[in-house]
Amino acid sequence: MQQYTVPQFIDVEAKIIGPITTRQFLIFLGAALIIFISYKVFDFGLFLVIGITVFLIAGTFAFLKVNGRPFHYFVLNLVQTFRKPSVRVWNHQQASFEEKEKKEFKFEEVVVNKKLNEATLAELSLIIDTKGKYKGENGNQDIKNL
């Protein structure tokens, strides 16, 4: 039986310059470009503020790890969390998509009751809004007779 070598340390990035990986080098190269442009465009005081800020952000993205993963994965997961709903509820009794398509809907003719006045409609609305806790002035006697 032939034996195979199992790769180990597959999550370790290749180092190109000392302890610096390719990703870290490219991040600092981009930061150096932004700092150089800010040196040419802005005065020295604003250049220092922008340069230090860009350097700190680049250092954070290059070296900081959250839960053993690079910081940019943390930022991407954070953005996805804010964009998607955070609570998902599984309703195991809900019909499947195919069953919903096969269901035929029957529409009944609506009978309009002309006896309803504005006060009765307001009372019906209150009963529905309170989900039946409010029984009405006469205990629903007038509404049941409609």
Image (cartoon, rainbow, N blue to C red):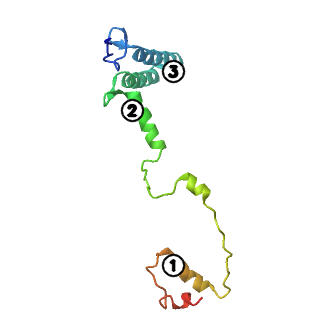
* Residue wearing tag 3: 42
Question: Do the numbered discs 3 and 2 sit on residues whose CB atoms are within 8 Å?
Answer: no
Residue drawn at 55 percent across, 87 percent down? 143
Q: Would you identify the image quadrant in which residue 77 lies?
A: top left
Q: Element at badge 1?
A: helix
Question: Do the numbered discs 3 and 1 sit on residues whose CB atoms are within 8 Å?
Answer: no
Residue drawn at 50 percent across, 88 percent down? 140
Please, what is the three-letter code of the amino acid marked with disc 2? Phe
Nearer to us: label 3 or label 1: 1
* Residue wearing tag 1: 126
Q: Position of residue 108 (x, y in %)?
A: 66, 73
Residue 7 to residue 116: above or below = above
Q: Would you identify the image quadrant in which residue 31 lies?
A: top left
Residue drawn at 61 percent across, 55 percent down? 101
Whole-angstrom CA distance, mark 2 to mark 1, is: 49 Å
Q: Residue placed farthest to the top in the image? A: 17
| Left or right of residue 115: residue 22 | left
* Residue wearing tag 2: 74
Q: Element at badge 2?
A: helix
Please, what is the three-letter code of the amino acid marked with disc 3? Phe
Q: Quadrant of the image for the N terminus? A: top left
Q: Position of residue 93 (x, y in %)?
A: 45, 58
Q: Element at badge 3?
A: loop
Please, what is the three-letter code of the amino acid marked with disc 1? Leu
Residue drawn at 60 percent across, 60 percent down? 103
Q: Earlier in the sequence, mark 3 or mark 1?
A: 3
In the image, 66 versus 13, the foreground residue is 13
Q: Quadrant of the image for the C terminus? A: bottom right
Q: Residues within 10 Å of mark 1 (few under 14, many from 20)?
A: some
